[in-house]
Every structure is written in C-alpha cells, then in structure tokens.
Image: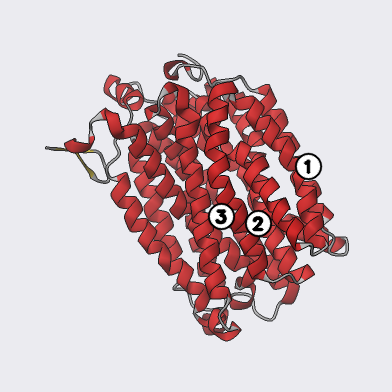
Amino acid sequence: MSTKTGLFTQTASVRAPGNQSKRSSLAGFIGSALEYYDMYIYASASALVFSRVFFPDMGATGLLYSLGLYGVAYLARPLGGFLAGHLGDRFGRRNVMILTLLVMGVSTFLIGCLPSYDSVGVLAPTMLIVLRLCQGLSVGGELSGASSLTLEHAPADRRALYTSWAINGIWVGYILATLAFIGVAALPEEQLLAWGWRVPFWLSAAILIVGLIIRRTVRDTEAFTTEKELGTTAKVPLAEVLRTQPWDVVRVIFAAFLVVISTTVPVYGLTYATNIVHIPASTMLWAVIVGYVIALVTQPLLAHLSDRIGRKPVLIGGNLFGAAAVWLFFWAVGAANIPMIFVGVILCIAVGFAATNSVYPAFFSEMFNVRYRVTGMAVGLQLGLVLTGFSPVIIQAISSANGDAWWPAAAYTTVACVLSAIAVATARETYKTPLDELGVKR
C-alpha cells in the first residue's frame, strides 16, 4: 500500500513512527552534506581558480569579482527561505527537503559543465551567476526544513542532539569538498584550469542520488499532519509569523551572525593565506579539514550539553569564545605560523563555532509555532546570512585599503559574534519547553 505525498510516493512500510526520528536525522545529515559540499566546492573554486577561468586578465579585480559571486547566492537565500517555508508549512517538510536537494544537485553539476570566459565571453560568468542563484534558492530552505522535521520527530530531551546531525552533515560536505580540491589542486595549472576544477562539481551527482533515496523514506511529522488534517495550517505562513512573532524573526536575523566565522576563517582565510601571504593552498586546506574532523566529535557533544543545561549558555559561550579565537587564527595566518594556524582553526571551528553551530538549528526552530516554524526560521536565518555571504568581499575591500592587513577579518568576525550573543541573550530559553507549547499559542 502507498500514499501520495506530493513529489514522491511514500510507502506504508516507512510510516512506522519508531524509526522516523533516526530517519529524519539521517536525511538531514545526507542532505546537508550535499548542499554544503556544493556550496564549499564553489567557495574553494572562487578562491583558487574562478578569477582565472571566468575573469581572466583582471588581477586583483578578478579575485574581487570571484569572491563577490560567492556572495551572490546569499542574496537568493532569503527568497529560497520564503519559498521553502511557505511550501513546508503548507504542504509538508518532506517534499521541500526533496525539492531543495534536487535544485542544488542539478545546479552544481551544471556549474561543472560551464564553458570558460575564453570560450564564450561574458556569457560564461552570466551563466555562473544564474546557477549560483539557484544554489542560493536551494540552500535557503534546506536547513530550516530539515531542522523542523527532525525537531518534531526527535525525543523531547534530545532535540538539539538529533537536529545537530544536519549540521554534522554540513561538515562532512565541507570535508569532502576540501579533499576533492586538494586532489585537483595538485594538477598542473593548465589541467587544473582546463578540466580539473570541474571534477568536484561533477562528483556531487553521487551524493544527490544517495540523498534522494534516503529522503524518500521519511514521512512528515505528527505535529504537522495534525494541523493539516484539522485544516488549520497557515494560509500565508510569512504573514502569520510576522504578525504573531515579529521580534523572534528579528532575533534570528541577528543571532544568525554567528555563522560569519564559518566564512571568514575557511574561505577568506584561504584567500588571504594563498594570495597575500603565499602559504600553499594544500596547507590551509588540511588545516581546515582537521578543524572539521574534530568538529564532527565536538558538535554532537555540545548539542547534547545544550539539551542538559540550556541552549542560551552554549550559544553565548560559543560566540564569545569564537570572537576571541579568531584573532589568534588571523595573526597566525599573517605571520605564516603554520602550527598556530592549525591551533587557530581548531579553536575557531571545532570549539567556538561548533558550540553555536550545533545548537542554533534546534534553538531557532523552537522559537516558532508549528504553523509557521519552517518560515520563521528560514526567513530570519537567511536574512541574517546575507552578511555572511558578502563577508569575504567586504573584508577584502577593507584589507586592501589598509595595506593588505589581516586585522579587518578578525575585527569583522568579532563584531558579528558579539551581536549574535546579544540577540541570543534577549531570547527565551526553550530546551525544556514541550513541543506543542513552542512559539506563541493561538
């Protein structure tokens, strides 16, 4: 027996509730791995090769354009968050998770097929912009849909632990992307620019297939299906969340600044190290991999800690720790101190950012009522992340105006982390709140 749930047929064999919390957690893990594998291979390519493939003979300006295109996706993310939130809150979280996965996977594969500027001129960067915007639309709704689905399936005392696996999927995606670029970066420059950079984009097809198979086995939560059966789902979720919980949306926008460190350290840090200090790209990529691998262990532990002592202490502590640790990292990069670069990455990524990164999916989801949970988190998060996407190009401009100094990157990141900590401090604690009491009760 099977039932239709929109994009795919859902078989009755997967409707037993016992495994749904684990299935949804795994689906979030695999989906995030694909989404952020795709995002980070783009980030690595923008730092290492895109300025020469799509903006040749432009020198530093070409690098600035390349980094600017990395941020273009963040302009599309709020729209992606709105669309995914609307569909997820009206028609189900599961179908949205499948749709975002398809859009990201296809867009990334096609980027690997693009011709260079030398082949078709300005059409090449134009097509790159279009596909980058599609990536932004996809990732704008991915985490909010996966987090809401997992949160609503998870045991009450382990909501952050279960939702943190979507975040661990992000790090797996980053690790796979970094390993892919370590491999192609070793190619002779002519081969790297001709075809080598394309291989990581093509490899995303394998993760897409696995993700689709897994997500097909997940069903929507009882919390959502009850609303749907009663006919009480929000007709316009965005209008309702702005009417009933506008300040929580604002809090999420500013709290989302915590993600800035994940861009300034591995993305701008790689750009600065390779282009200004002339540290080998492979050295920086390995430092990032070490940080991500350690974070795979620390993130579930820190998420579980927030299930025990509360979301706010872990989030605030992680923000403040990261705000301090980033100075060590960028000083080490500026001094070409390789051992301290590794230490700095570990402290920034596997400790400070891990504390915030593992907890915010549960915390942001718990702020909102089930009727507009996906929308509230998605719109607030993606509006906040616009700053994150343009962090590298903003810092690059400030640094260039100050003699290629490293301190603007550290200062920018510190301000973002402190603002995030303040926003979190103004929110209510939710780790012990029952699922049916989250958000404003109607």
Tell me if 270 is positioned left or right of 108 in this view.
Answer: right
Gap in angstroms between the C-alphas marked 3 and 1: 29 Å
Closest to the observer, 4 or 365: 365
- Three-letter residue code for mark 1: Ala
Q: Residues within 10 Å of mark 1 (few under 14, many from 20)?
A: some
Give the numbered dot on residue 266: 2
Q: Where 131 sits versus 87, above or below?
A: below
Q: Which residue is mark 3?
A: 73
Gap in angstroms between the C-alphas marked 2 and 1: 16 Å
Direction right: furthest residue: 403
Tell me if 420 is positioned left or right of 15 in this view.
Answer: right
- The residue under the point 76% across, 60% down is 396
Q: How is the image coloured?
A: secondary structure
Give the numbered dot on residue 359: none
- Three-letter residue code for mark 3: Ala
- The residue under the point 65% across, 34% down is 255
Based on the displayed image, in which of its 4 quarters is residue 324 positioned? top right
Tell me if 407 is positioned left or right of 197 in this view.
Answer: right
User: Can residue 199 be seen here?
Assistant: yes
Quadrant the C terminus occupies: top left
Q: Which residue is mark 1?
A: 324
- The residue under the point 41% across, 34% down is 150
Q: Please name which of the two marks, 3 or 2, marks the residue nearer to the observer.
A: 2
Q: Considering the numbered disc 3 on the image, is that residue within a helix, a strand or a loop? A: helix
Q: Earlier in the sequence, mark 3 or mark 2?
A: 3
Closest to the observer, 40 or 86: 40
